[in-house]
Image: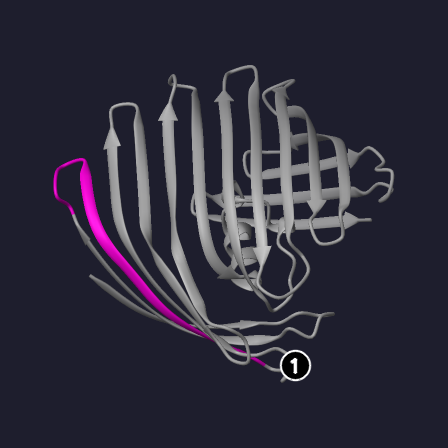
C-alpha cells in the first residue's frame, strides 16, 4: 500500500495558463500469484489556475489494476472511472482505462501495444506523454487549460542486432476537448534505422508522417519528416551526437548537437544544443 501526496507547479512562458496542482494518490497492490497481481489505484487532483480567466477543477480517479508476466510477454490493465468537478462549467465523468501489452518475438525483437481512453486535462496529458513518449506524442496535445477525452492506440516494433537496430511505430489518436474548439484526429507512422559503422561510430536515418484533422475548422495538416544522425564515441565515457534534418515545407530545417559524458554506470551528464 502506498500513500503519496504531490505538489506540481506548471509554468508556461507564453500562454497565460500557469497553475498549481495538489494531488493525493493511494495505491494498493497484491501479488496474487507468482506472475500475476491485482490492485486498486485512486487519486484526487485539485488544479488551481493563476488567472481568473480559466476556471479551477478537481479530478477524482479510481482504477482496478491487473498485471502479469508470461514466458514471452507481459501486460498491465487499468480499468476504472474518472469524474471532473469544474467551476463555471458542467461537471461529469466517464469510464477510463488503459492496456499495455509487450510481446517478445525473439531475443532481439519485441512488439508493444498501448490502448488508452483517459479523461484528463491538457497539462497532465502533455507531461505524461513527455515522460513516456511511447504512450503518445507530446506535441499532439494542445495546451489550453481545458479538459479533454484522449483516446489512443499506439503500436511499436523494435529489433536490436549486432549490425542493425530498427524501430517502427504507428499511432491513432482522437482528442475531444470540453470547451475549446481543438478537437482533432491524428494518424502517424514512423521508422528509424541505426547502423554501426565501426565499434565507435554509428549512423542512422529516421522518417515520419503525421496526418492531423482539426474537426471544428475542417482543416487538414500533413507533416513529412526525414532526418539523419551520426554518433561517435570518443572514449569509453564520452559520446557525441549530431544530426541534420531535411527541410519541411513550412518549417525550414534545424541542426542539433548532443554531447554526453558518463564517468561511471550510475551517472551521466548531457549537453544538448538545437538551432531552428
Outermost left residue = 33
Quarter residue 35 falls in:
top left
Q: Residue at x 66, y 31 (%)?
A: 231
Read off the magenta span. 31-49
Quarter residue 72 falls in:
top left
| Vertical relation: 129 (above or below) 2 | above
Whether residue 113 is in magenta: the answer is: no
How many numbered marks have been drawn onto this rendered protein structure?
1
Scheme of image coloration: one colour
Where is residue 96 drawn, in percent x and y? 39, 53
Quarter residue 109 falls in:
top left
Q: Which residue is mark 1?
A: 53
- Classify mark 1: helix, strand or loop: loop
Where is residue 250 drawn, in percent x and y? 86, 43
Q: Residue at x 50, y 73 (%)?
A: 90
| Vertical relation: 145 (above or below) 164 | below
Quarter of the figure with the N terminus: bottom left
| Vertical relation: 6 (above or below) 197 | below
Dominant SS in magenta: strand
Where is residue 10 drawn, in percent x and y? 57, 70
Amino acid at each position: 500500500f502506498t500513500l503519496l501526496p504531490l505538489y506540481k507547479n506548471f509554468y508556461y512562458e507564453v500562454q497565460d495558463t500557469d497553475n498549481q496542482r495538489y494531488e493525493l494518490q493511494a495505491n494498493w497492490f497484491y501479488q496474487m500469484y507468482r506472475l500475476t497481481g491485482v490492485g486498486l489505484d485512486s487519486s484526487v487532483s485539485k488544479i488551481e489556475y493563476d488567472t481568473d480567466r480559466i476556471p479551477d477543477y478537481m479530478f477524482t480517479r479510481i482504477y482496478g489494476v491487473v498485471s502479469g508476466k508470461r514466458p514471452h510477454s507481459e501486460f498491465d490493465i487499468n480499468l476504472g472511472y474518472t469524474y471532473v468537478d469544474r467551476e463555471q462549467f458542467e461537471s461529469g465523468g466517464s469510464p477510463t482505462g488503459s492496456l499495455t501489452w509487450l510481446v517478445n518475438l525473439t531475443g532481439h525483437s519485441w512488439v508493444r501495444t498501448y490502448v488508452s481512453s483517459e479523461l484528463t486535462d491538457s497539462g497532465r496529458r502533455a507531461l505524461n506523454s513527455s515522460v513516456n513518449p511511447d504512450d503518445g506524442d507530446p506535441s499532439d496535445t494542445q495546451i489550453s487549460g481545458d479538459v479533454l477525452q484522449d483516446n489512443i492506440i499506439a503500436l511499436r516494433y523494435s529489433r536490436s542486432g549486432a549490425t542493425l537496430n530498427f524501430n517502427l511505430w504507428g499511432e491513432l489518436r482522437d482528442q475531444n476537448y470540453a470547451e475549446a474548439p481543438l478537437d482533432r484526429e491524428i494518424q502517424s507512422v514512423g521508422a528509424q534505422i541505426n547502423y554501426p559503422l565501426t565499434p565507435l561510430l554509428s549512423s542512422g536515418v529516421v522518417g515520419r508522417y503525421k496526418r492531423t484533422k482539426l474537426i471544428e475548422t475542417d482543416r487538414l495538416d500533413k507533416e513529412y519528416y526525414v532526418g539523419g544522425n551520426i554518433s561517435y564515441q570518443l572514449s569509453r565515457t564520452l559520446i557525441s551526437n549530431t544530426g541534420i534534418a531535411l527541410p519541411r515545407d513550412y518549417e525550414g530545417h534545424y541542426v542539433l548537437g548532443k554531447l554526453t559524458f558518463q564517468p561511471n554506470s550510475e551517472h551521466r551528464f548531457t549537453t544538448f544544443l538545437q538551432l531552428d
